[in-house]
Image (cartoon, coloured by chain):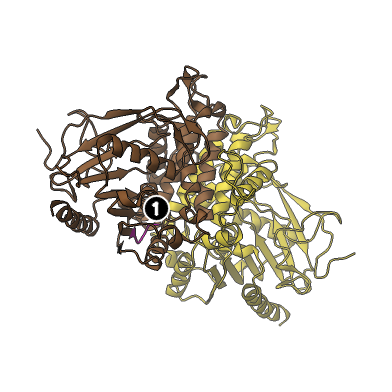
Chain colours: A brown, B yellow
């Protein structure tokens, strides 16, 4: 039975790129693959394409299911589909797994053609600007000269922002959700603890654990547990878990006692069994390094001067990882640079994770904004 | 050369207790030692004694130095000494290392007389109420029938609060600083990640690492790094470290790049070389379990009905580990129970660590409050 408003069964595709890509670090990727999915149809003048950029643990599988019996749909299935806020009846939507990822695109677990072994520790660090460059090549490949919009939450929002600076002519709308113009010391600190958990796991083997037939699960599990704390709000966690005990009584031991412990350990266990530890490191470094103002005398408004897109910036009241104040820094810089920007601060108890939820005011806003973009495409 | 306002060179003492102590868990400690220090002189009617309760990583060495060439004085030396807010010219001050600690009092690294080996995994979990019971025996031992005040920050504040419930006749003032009536789900979550880091360290050996001649340094280091993030405020960390790079340039690797990484790793390294991992686990569990309202129909005001002490509750604006809102819960419960309470919310950028700092408004407040207590003693 077909799900209503679903894009249905989808299949990932892979594009191969032979032209070397010089990264911001100076390293060069001689060739690489990008795995992507598309939903909806590209219109005749190719003006209705939307790029979805993923966050730390995301990928190209944004909507629909790969098989009928898939347990879960793509990670943003509540946002994208026929009749949904990003309406696939109107838009041609592209999801892509970023370079360094572990879901099909070239990354640390990919076989390095030079050695016949996984890249592992040899895979270079990639920055948000590198991802955007690679995404631009994918756009070329798909025949898309200009995106109607580039959309992303969190680290994905940073890509949407970067697009407006790197390729001002190729993006009409930049939709930056639950994001920040750069990380704070506290943000970096959390990332560093997560990285140290992985790097010091004896099973990590300097990043070449594939050859040792080990997986640094302990470290990755801790990293994910910690991450989850920062994705939820204190209040939201309190409402959902509070001080609830699994058995109703103190057990005076180190096994799971509180429900919140059970939740975190479950999330950590599941993630550490499926995600690549090197990819996790790369993603957190891309977050730390993101700072588009850095080469513009540390002025974000200067960095944004060349942008031609219109912007929608969205934040959530209970998000303490990237609080509304961080979004307002972006809005302020855009206003200083005399750009066209809409801003909404959405009331939500879901913390940073709110960008993945379907709180009605949030989806209503997205629907309204996307409807206006659709009108431009038709005009 | 003597330091001004210092208690000078101090020596720790140890009291041995042969009477078995039944813990809240039902476990029994047949005998135990408590290591303590005292500063100042007990007056004739023994009415000027102050108990200082330590937090997670603290101990009995609160003020002064053990040797002239000690690098650092006791952990609360800025608060305690002749002429300082807790004035040793007026008060007899007692610092004690809690049961389960690793600074002299009986704990997991102590030799278990039954086995001739360190207790390790056999050491029972101890609760805040257990510490208070043990501290009461130390008071008996020192001939102190009633404390002029019990004072503590963070986990130490929980002990000060518990004293007023467990021994209403034996405490005249309870001074509860940067504390909370119980942990939130988020607080427990951070503790659980820290514990999991230790428990899953291959060098932990189920708590019996002493026999394996290993130390779970990796886990303890991560736990401490994470802890430090929660002790500092986002803004304070931003002011001190921001996005400062050690070398001024991105290095595109996993070695230390940002100053905040350097700070955290240094703190983690130092701590993991000196602190006992089992003690860390015990202390975090005592935090999780603390919930004096639990046996009073989850009403803190009911729990406090029997209290006879006067209370001073202090919080700090930028403390997000135990925010002012948590202190206000205590104040509200005390008011509901018609107790005498003073409350101060101190403006500070130091986060949770502010209780250890010497911000002037904080020390002025403490000095004023302690001066009034001193007048009672003299009267």
Q: For residue B373, what is the image quadrant? A: bottom right
Residue B124 drawn at (x, y percent): 57, 41
Residue B242 left/right relative to A101: right
Q: Is residue B363 left or right of residue A232?
A: right
Give the quadrant of residue A318. bottom left
Q: Which residue range is magenta in the image?
A: A315-319
Q: Is residue A335 above or below residue B130?
A: below
Q: Residue at x 59, y 42 (%)?
A: B251
In the image, taking residue A57 as reference, residue B113 lies left or right, namely right
- The answer, for residue B20, to whether it is visible in the render is no
- Residue under label 1, please give it: A165
Query: Which SS type dominates the magenta stretch?
Result: loop
The residue lying toward the viewer, choosing from B319 and A227, is: A227
Counting from the top left corner in percent of width and height, residue B270 is at 69, 45
Provide residue B149's location: percent of width, then percent of height. 64, 69
Q: Quadrant of the C terminus of chain A?
A: bottom left
Name the residue rendered at 53%, 62% in the picture.
Answer: B235
Q: How many marks?
A: 1
Give A226 or A23, whichever is nearer the viewer. A23
Is A176 covered by the magenta stretch?
no
Q: Residue at x 40, y 58 (%)?
A: A304
- For label 1, count other residues whose C-alpha is less than 10 Å away and answer few (under 14), some (14-19) or many (20+): many
Nearest the eye: B303 or B68: B68
């Amino acid at each position: 039975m077909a799900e209503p408003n679903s894009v249905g069964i989808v299949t990932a595709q892979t594009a191969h790129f032979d032209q070397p890509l010089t990264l911001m670090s100076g390293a060069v990727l001689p060739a690489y693959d990008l795995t992507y999915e598309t939903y909806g149809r590209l219109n005749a003048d190719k003006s209705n394409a939307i790029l979805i950029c993923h966050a730390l643990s995301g990928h190209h599988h944004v909507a629909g299911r790969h098989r009928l019996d898939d347990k879960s749909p793509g990670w943003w299935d509540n946002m994208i589909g026929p009749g949904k806020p990003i309406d696939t009846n109107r838009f041609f939507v592209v999801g892509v797994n970023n370079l360094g990822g572990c879901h099909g695109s070239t990354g640390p677990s990919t076989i390095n053609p030079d050695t016949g072994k996984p890249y592992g520790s040899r895979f270079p660090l990639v920055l948000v600007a590198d991802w955007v460059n690679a995404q631009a090549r994918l756009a070329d490949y798909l025949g898309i000269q200009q995106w109607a919009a580039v959309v992303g939450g969190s680290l994905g929002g940073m890509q949407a922002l970067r697009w407006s600076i790197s390729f001002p002519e190729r993006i009409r709308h930049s939709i930056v959700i639950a994001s920040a113009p750069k990380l704070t010391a506290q943000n970096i600190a959390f990332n560093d603890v997560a990285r140290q958990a992985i790097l010091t796991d004896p099973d990590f083997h300097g990043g070449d654990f594939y050859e040792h037939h080990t997986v640094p699960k302990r470290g990755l599990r801790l990293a994910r547990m910690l991450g989850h704390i920062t994705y939820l709000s204190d209040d939201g966690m309190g409402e959902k878990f509070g001080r609830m005990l699994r058995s109703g009584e103190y057990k005076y031991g180190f096994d799971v006692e509180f429900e919140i412990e059970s939740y975190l350990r479950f999330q950590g266990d599941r993630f550490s069994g499926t995600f690549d530890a090197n990819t996790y490191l790369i993603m957190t470094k891309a977050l730390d390094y993101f700072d588009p103002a850095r080469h513009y005398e540390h002025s974000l408004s200067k960095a944004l001067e060349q942008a031609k897109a219109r912007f929608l910036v969205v934040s959530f009241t209970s998000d303490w990882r990237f609080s509304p104040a961080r979004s307002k820094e972006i809005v302020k810089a855009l206003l200083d640079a005399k750009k066209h920007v809409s801003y909404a601060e959405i009331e939500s108890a879901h913390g940073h994770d709110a960008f993945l939820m379907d709180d009605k005011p949030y989806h209503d806003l997205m629907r309204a904004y996307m409807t206006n973009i659709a009108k431009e495409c038709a005009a």
